[in-house]
Image: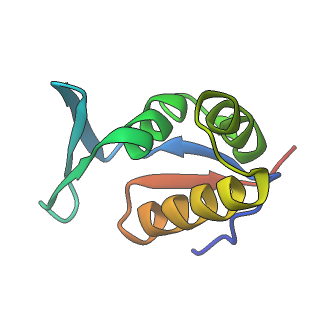
Amino acid sequence: MSHAITLDSVVVASPDQVSSDLAGETVLLSMTSAKYYGFAGVGSRIWQLIATATPVRAVCDTIAAEYEVERSECEADVLGFLEQCVKSGLVEVRSAT
């Protein structure tokens, strides 16, 4: 089942993956696809933020505060990153409640 991601969506790392921090990079293994993924920099920070169920808007708030980026660009980039993670089965999307 596919869910569109919006700023009001709540996202969380899928339980069907394992991840580890290696020298500032996040390395993940999808247990369903047996593929490895690596995130550095902002991608790694986003991954830390969604370790527990978190609204996308809150992720954007944190990223915009920690990195020098325009809010609109931040939102587009975070949404794009999360959409790719959903397609890869790394992230689950929940509707805002």
Horizontal and vertical percent position of residue 38:
21, 49
For residue 34, above or below residue 48: below
Residue 53 picture quarter: top right
Tell me the quadrant of the picture where the C terminus can be found: top right
Q: Is residue 22 left or right of residue 85?
A: left
Specify whether 22 is left or right of 40.
left
Mark count: 0
User: Which color scheme does this rendered protein use?
Assistant: rainbow
Depth check, front residue: 16 or 38 = 38
The front one of 50 and 73 is 73
The residue at the point 31 percent across, 47 percent down is 16
Rendered residue at 71%/56% (across/down): 75
Give the residue at x 57% y 74%. Answer: 1
Extreme residue toward the front, this view:
68
Q: Position of residue 51 (x, y in %)?
A: 47, 30
Picture residue at 36% right of the left edge, 40% below the top: 41
Q: Relative to the observer, which residue lies in front, 16 or 13?
A: 13
Nearer to me, 69 or 49 = 69
Residue 64 occupies quadrant: top right
Query: Residue 90: horizontal and vertical position, in percent?
Result: 38, 54
Query: Is residue 14 placed above or below 21 in the rendered structure?
Result: below
Q: Which residue reaches farthest right?
A: 97
Residue 12: image x %, image y %?
54, 41
Q: Is residue 90 left or right of residue 86?
A: left
Is 97 positioned to the left or the right of 93 in the image? right
